[in-house]
Image (spheres, rainbow, N blue to C red):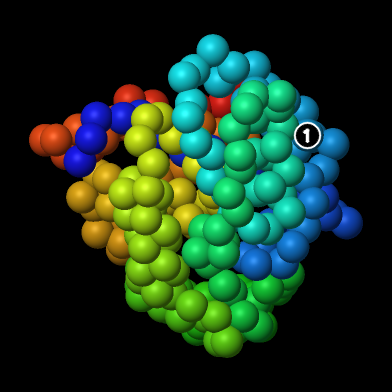
Amino acid sequence: MANRTVYLVRNGKVRQADNQRRYIGQIDLPLSEEGFLQSRKLREILESEDIQAAYCSDLERSRQTAEIIVGDRKIDIQPLTDLREIALGDWEGCSFADISRLYPGEFRARAADAGYYRTPGGESFAECGKRVMRAFQAILSGVSGNILIVGHAGVNRVLLSHVLGMPLGNIFRIGQDYGCINIFQCKQSGYQIKLLNYTDG
């Protein structure tokens, strides 16, 4: 594994009709005004970093965040379907409050088995992780130098769990705020986390 740095970013905040916590997996929402501000802040933070390649999910919020970060650099951004957020099936767009009230058993079951519970019509984090790691390994083998990856909360947690050697059952112990940066180094000896869930303000 060649020495290089990976800048792993979560997309900026998305546009919603209200401020309720919702299950937003593969619903293709754009950035909100706050999300655009967060993305511009990310560009400022990363503008002096030596980045040779950029990848993102093909969902709009991830593509918009990546485009703002890259700006006028001569870097092609490659959207990848395998970097999409976890598919949440029947829960897509539903509020946490509604799911916990209407389906209390399923809500508790997911909390108890975070890594392997599959929402109805969706996928588990273990299933999501297979495609995310497939994409990550392809990225590492396909380019040299430092890499920007703009993912999503679930995608980033899966990847960071791998980097940390942490079981998926503990995936929600990793915070991933909108517009956050994670930095880790890939070395011959393995991975080393340098920064986790950083936001400037």
Question: Is 165 above or below relative to 86?
Answer: above
Amino acid carrying mark 1 in the image: Phe
Q: Residue at x 28, y 52 (%)?
A: 162
Q: Quadrant of the C terminus?
A: top right
Q: Is residue 84 left or right of residue 132?
A: right
Residue 128 is situated, as x and y percent measured from the top left of the image, at: 44, 69
Q: From this viewpoint, which residue is outermost toward the right?
A: 17
Q: Is residue 174 left or right of residue 201?
A: left
Quarter of the view holding residue 113 = bottom left
Q: Quadrant of the N terminus?
A: top left
Quarter of the view holding residue 35 = top right
Question: Is 68 above or below relative to 59?
Answer: above
Q: Residue at x 46, y 49 (%)?
A: 156
Q: Residue at x 63, y 27 (%)?
A: 74
**Could you say whether the residue bearing mark 1 is in a helix, strand or loop?**
helix
Q: Is residue 143 left or right of residue 19?
A: left
Question: Is 29 above or below relative to 201?
Answer: below
Residue 104 in sight? no
Q: From this viewpoint, which residue is outermost toward the top?
A: 48
Question: Is 63 above or below relative to 94?
Answer: above
Quarter of the view holding residue 110 = bottom left
Residue 5 is situated, as x and y percent measured from the top left of the image, at: 35, 29
**The one of 77 and 19 positioned closer to us in this rendering:** 77
Q: Residue at x 65, y 83 (%)?
A: 90
Q: Is residue 29 left or right of residue 108?
A: right
**The one of 145 and 176 positioned closer to us in this rendering:** 145
Q: Which residue is identified by label 1? A: 36
Residue 97 is situated, as x and y percent measured from the top left of the image, at: 68, 67
Q: Residues within 10 Å of mark 1 (few under 14, many from 20)?
A: many
Q: From this viewpoint, which residue is outermost toward the left?
A: 189
Residue 155 in sight? yes
